[in-house]
Amino acid sequence: MLLLDSEALSAVATGPAQRRDRVRALMAEMRARDLPVATVAAVLAEVIRGRAADAAIFSGLRRERVEVHPVDSRTGVRAGQLLGAARKGSELAVDAFVVAVGDLAGGAVVATVDLEDLTALASHANDVVIASIQAESTRRRR
């Protein structure tokens, strides 16, 4: 499964061309393997603002057939465990929900620009891999 965090979901809808192309390439790879592309309902809280621009997000979800996973009690508990294991605070709760969904699904690739935080969380999950959607030149500057 490919999981989109807020930056990846935004990239599909309105993001810079390089990020959008990177996310679309990851989605095409997953579709070729007959694997789902998804996000987590909590991610929507990071990208939806009740404005006309939200239409691009909803359009991207439909166009790309992105499944939206709920944050249920099982996901919430696993996210909390990941935060604790990584010694991170609740400011990373949405990232933890994304990693938790991947972990509970038996593995996933998470598309993001936030490599540091998601890698810290994923290091305590099973078979969750973090994939950068940043351009090569941007990644080298870090």
Image (cartoon, rainbow, N blue to C red):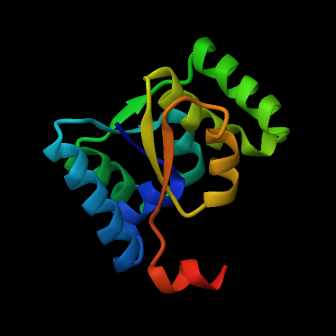
Quadrant location, the N terminus: top left
Residue at left offset 24%, top offset 36%? 35
Query: Is residue 49 visible to the viewer in this orientation of the structure?
Result: no
Residue at left offset 63%, top offset 85%? 141
Front residue of 112/73: it is 112
Residue 80 appears at what percent x and percent y? 74, 25
Residue 132 appears at what percent x and percent y? 48, 63
Query: Is residue 45 visible to the viewer in this orientation of the structure?
Result: yes
Q: Is residue 39 left or right of residue 97?
A: left
Q: Is residue 82 left or right of residue 3?
A: right
Residue lying at the far top of the rendered structure: 73
Q: Is residue 79 left or right of residue 49?
A: right
Front residue of 27/73: it is 27
Rendered view: 31 above or below 7: above
Q: How many marks?
A: 0
Residue at left offset 27%, top offset 35%? 36
Residue at left offset 79%, top offset 45%? 91
Front residue of 16/108: it is 108
Residue 16 appears at what percent x and percent y? 41, 77
Rendered view: 38 above or below 112: above
Quadrant of res 81 = top right
Rendered view: 1 above or below 64: above
Quadrant of res 87 = top right
Quadrant of res 116 = bottom right
Rendered view: 11 above or below 102: below
Q: Is residue 94 left or right of residue 107?
A: right
Quadrant location, the C terminus: bottom right
Residue 47 appears at what percent x and percent y? 53, 53
